[in-house]
Image (tube, grey):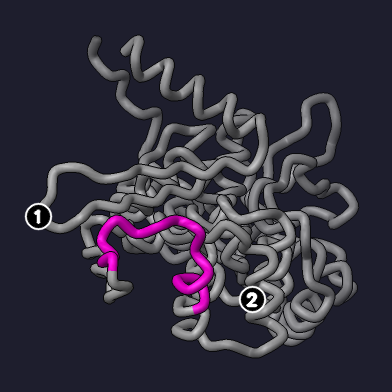
């Protein structure tokens, strides 16, 4: 069956829309001021998107943005869509500017009105958060996951559209395999993404994360701790207790890809030069196990 072409490329998200806005302003000559005036809307007529992917707006960051707005104004228009039957508008992109403008006591904001459907609103909101907000690693990973699950975008497509490497996308997606408490440490800035990645394939990431934070371990020390406490036996370790083989880059990349697609921790133990090995998939809940079984069953039918 021929694959249906995409409605529009991912790059047609916020950056492309903003590019259109800037070109209009630069090429419109004397009418640019009038266009901007016509696009000013009172802050009370702008409503936040109830499905906004980002829920946390740091007060300190909003205050800093408000200070900038007081000095220079709102330089980048918000993207909004009309709410049917009312004179109000829903914010598609720019909620941080809207919140900061209220702190700065700015009463009217520049906007560009677009007739987006619900799906387009969500997609643009996710892209805006990834591109423009200072996200922590978990928020960024959640944005990538939504683009993949809701809109069918591949890691390669996201990487190309957002000018990021595919390995960056894959590594962040793997963080979503960690327990919620460890993800919370990353959100709060108590644990870096580099530290957290070292804990993904361990059997007790929550306990190890606490050890890492208490002792202030470096990423390299965390990787060593993870290897020492791993409960998965290595097939390449000698019977006399000698050193085991390090996984090559291809094996680690495959683990990352499988883990990102399954949304579970994946470990591949394959002895160099051999033909056999062990593929381990770690699930955290019975729901995860059910999801894995459905995925495998679907593959069998296909």
Q: Which residue is mark 2?
A: 191
Q: Which residues are magenta?
A: 225-239
Mark 2 Cα within 10 Å, few/some/many (few <14, many 20+)?
some
Q: Is residue 18 left or right of residue 250?
A: right
At horizontal 40% and vertical 57% (from top left) the residue drawn is 233
Q: Which element carries disc 1, helix, strand or loop? A: loop
Q: Residue furthest front?
A: 240
Q: Residue furthest left?
A: 273
Picture coordinates of residue 33, whole percent (x, y): 61, 64
Task: Choose the circle earlier in sequence order: 2 or 1.
Answer: 2
Question: Is residue 16 visible to the viewer in this orientation of the structure?
Answer: yes
Q: Is residue 256 left or right of residue 135?
A: left
Mark linked to residue 273? 1
- In the image, residue 140 sits, relative to residue 286, either above or below, namely below
Picture coordinates of residue 103, whole percent (x, y): 88, 73
Q: Give the quarter of the image for residue 179.
A: bottom right
Mark linked to residue 21? none
Picture coordinates of residue 300, whole percent (x, y): 34, 15
Q: Which element carries disc 2, helix, strand or loop? A: loop
Question: Is residue 24 visible to the viewer in this orientation of the structure?
Answer: no
At horizontal 68% and vertical 64% (from top left) the residue drawn is 206
Q: Count up the numbered dots.
A: 2
- Between 35 and 56, the residue placed more toward the observer is 56
At horizontal 62% and vertical 50% (from top left) the residue drawn is 112
Q: Is residue 59 left or right of residue 298?
A: right
Q: Is residue 3 left or right of residue 124?
A: left
Mark 1 Cα within 10 Å, few/some/many (few <14, many 20+)?
few
What is the spatial separation of the Cα atoms under label 2 and label 1, in whole angstroms? Answer: 37 Å
Q: Principal SS element in the magenta part?
A: loop
């Amino acid at each position: 069956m021929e694959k249906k072409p995409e409605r529009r490329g991912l790059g047609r998200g916020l950056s492309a829309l903003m590019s259109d806005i800037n070109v209009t302003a630069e090429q419109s000559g004397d009418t640019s001021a009038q266009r901007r005036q016509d696009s000013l809307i009172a802050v009370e007529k702008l409503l936040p998107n109830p499905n906004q992917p980002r829920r946390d707006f740091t007060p300190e960051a909003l205050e800093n943005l408000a200070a900038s707005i007081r000095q220079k104004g709102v330089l980048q228009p918000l993207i909004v869509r009309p709410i049917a039957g009312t004179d109000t508008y829903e914010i598609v992109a720019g909620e941080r500017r809207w919140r900061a403008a209220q702190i700065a006591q700015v009463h009217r904001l520049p906007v560009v009105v677009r007739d987006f459907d619900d799906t387009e609103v969500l997609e643009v909101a996710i892209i805006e958060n990834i591109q423009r907000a200072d996200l922590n690693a978990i928020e960024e990973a959640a944005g990538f996951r939504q683009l993949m699950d809701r809109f069918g975008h591949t890691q390669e497509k996201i990487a190309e559209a957002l000018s990021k490497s595919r390995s960056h996308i894959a590594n962040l997606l793997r963080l979503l395999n960690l327990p919620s408490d460890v993800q919370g440490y990353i959100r709060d800035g108590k644990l870096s993404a580099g530290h957290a990645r070292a804990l993904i394939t361990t059997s007790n990431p929550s306990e190890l994360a606490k050890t890492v934070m208490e002792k202030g371990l470096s990423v390299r020390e965390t990787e060593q701790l993870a290897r020492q406490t791993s409960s998965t036996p290595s097939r390449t370790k000698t019977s006399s207790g000698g050193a085991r083989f390090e996984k090559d880059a291809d094996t680690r990349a495959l683990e990352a890809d499988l883990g990102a697609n399954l949304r579970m921790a994946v470990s591949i133990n394959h002895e160099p030069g051999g033909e056999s090995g062990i593929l381990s998939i770690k699930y955290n809940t019975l729901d995860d196990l059910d999801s894995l079984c459905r995925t495998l069953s679907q593959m069998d039918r296909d």
